[in-house]
Amino acid sequence: MPRYYLNLRRKGVLIADPDGEEAADLPALRRVIENTIEDILRRPETYGENPYWDQCTFEIADEGGTIVMTVPFSEFAHEL
Amino acid sequence: MQVPSQRHLRNRLLAVLPTPDCDALRAALEPVPLVRGQVLIEPDQPFTHALFVEAGIVSAVARGDTRRIEIGLVGRDGFVGVPLALGVDRSPHESIVQIEGEALRLPSATFSDLVERHPAIRAVLLRYAHVFQLQTAQTALSNGSYSLEERLARWMLMCQDRVGGDDFPVTHEFLAFMLGVRRPGVTTTVHLLEGAGMIKARRSRIQILDRAKLEEAAGESYGSAEAEYRRLIGPGKPL
């Protein structure tokens, strides 16, 4: 399965994902990202307050370093 | 492979025993490797062995329906099989090797028999059971805390206490699994601790740079169980 790197961009700084995660295809990857963002935004007592996360965007790269998907956390904030 | 003589043993519990009691245990011990990811104790299965860790780290893990979370760490400071010392044959918790190393193990029945017949062995092991309980209580306190920074800082200090060096192998995935969070939570927290100069993180390895700052970041969640260990079992190094 292809490996993707869940890099996070926040206020211009890129926090690199050193290990990556496997996903069968981009739709599957998208679902993983959505579940991850929802888990983080739903549990501020564990992950920290939303204002931190609202400023984050996933910039997901493939093994070659090409950005394949960009998902801002703010896209999900209003649903919770 | 031979079991080392008492003064060459790295396990602290074996090292502090009176020599005749240590020798009684040593006669029954067998050296075994600890392989990363190896499950030493399956939940709800009777214990087959008790293991004294010489190097490496074993996690005790509690499992819910959808999540797993680490409740304690065992290194050369302790042994795997506390329920056996308490007269209990199985546990709902899993013991899994987190950092590879070595251990000295003996069959459950032999272990229970030695604990019964040697008051000095029983005393040290029950004290350890007490301190391990304090450690899990501190983990609960830490988990209820607001920040992943505190939990991760504490975890790193506890690891360093047990492996002894400045760096150890661990992936963000395993940390996330142990702390019961999604991996990006670990990655951002590691990034924060790195930014503050406490650690250096490379692929699959963490290096401790500033232990004092890590202790500050861990706050009250780290220190009291460690102090009780020193009080009840002995200084050794580093616990």
Image: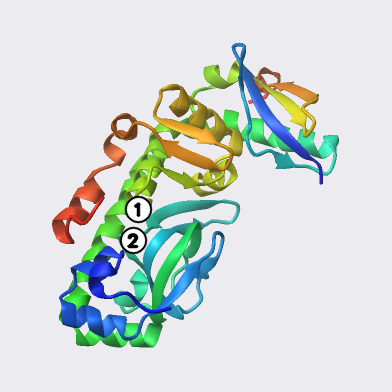
Residues at discs 1 and 2 in contact (Cβ within 8 Å)? yes
Horizontal and vertical percent for residue B206? 48, 39
Residue drawn where x is 76% and y is 22% of the image: A70
Q: Which residue is mark 1?
A: B162
Horizontal and vertical percent for residue B31? 42, 75
Q: Is residue B77 above or below residue A18?
A: below
Q: Which chain hosts label 1?
A: B
Q: Which residue is mark 2?
A: B76
Horizontal and vertical percent for residue B114? 27, 85
Q: Give whichever of A49, B232 is nearer the camera.
A: B232
Q: Which chain hosts label 2?
A: B
* Circle 1: residue type: Arg
Closer to the chain start, of discs 1 and 2, is 2
Q: Residues within 10 Å of mark 2 (few under 14, many from 20)?
A: many
Residue drawn where x is 24% and y is 49% of the image: B226
Q: Is residue B154 above or below residue A53?
A: below
Q: Residues within 10 Å of mark 1 (few under 14, many from 20)?
A: many
Q: Residue furthest top?
A: A12
Horizontal and vertical percent for residue A17? 63, 32
